[in-house]
Each structure stands twice: as C-alpha cells, then as structure tokens.
Image (cartoon, helix red, strand yellow):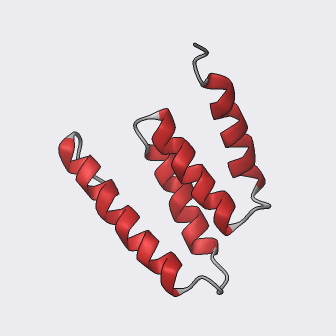
Amino acid sequence: MFFPNGPGLSLMFDQLRTIIARFITRYRRRPRPLLTRAWFSLAAQADSLEEKRRCLKAVLQLDPDNEPASVALLLLDQERPTS
C-alpha cells in the first residue's frame, strides 16, 4: 500500500480529521469503536507530539476507558520537553 509523503500527507490528515469531526457530530450518541480506532490510527501516524496528543485526547473523549490511549498519552506527557 502506498502512502504519500510531505504536504500531501498533511492535507490527507486534515481532510480525514474533517470527516471524523462530522461523523462525531452526527453520531454522538451511538457506539463509536470505529471512530476510536480511526483517531488512534491518526495518532500513530501523526508527525508531531502535539498532533499525537490531540488525536489521543479525541479517543478518550469518545471512550474514556480506552486504556491504550490513556497509556500512550501518559507516555507522551513524559516525552514532553521541560523548559
């Protein structure tokens, strides 16, 4: 499977985030395992720590008991540079 690099990848992520946000708005009260997996996948592919953090927080908004997302967020917080 081929994945684009550079600006094309960023544009693809922006479009996917927009689609996911619309999905969340429409189906807020329904079970959301597909959306949590989508956000978790975006976190895994994110370029920056802040982008990863935003995606993981979205997972936890959809599923507060999602242990893998909680652990990943804790690990990201440990990686955050101290000033």
Residue 52 visible in the displayed image: yes
Q: Position of residue 41 (x, y in %)?
A: 51, 54
Tell me if residue 66 comes above or below residue 78 in the rendering. below
What residue appears at the point 47 percent right and 53 percent down from the top-left corner? Answer: 42
Percent of width and height locating residue 22: 42, 77
- State the residue at coordinates (63%, 76%): 32
Where on the picture, by quarter, is residue 80?
top right
Point 66% across, 31% down: residue = 77
Q: Picture coordinates of residue 59 (x, y %)?
A: 62, 59
Q: 46 left or right of 24?
A: left
Q: Residue at x 69, y 25 (%)?
A: 78
**Up-down relation of residue 19 to residue 81 (above or below):** below
For residue 82, which quarter of the picture? Answer: top right
Residue 37 shown left or right of residue 64 in the figure: left
Horizontal and vertical percent position of residue 17? 39, 63
Residue sitting farthest toward the front: 83
Where on the picture, by quarter, is residue 37?
Answer: bottom right
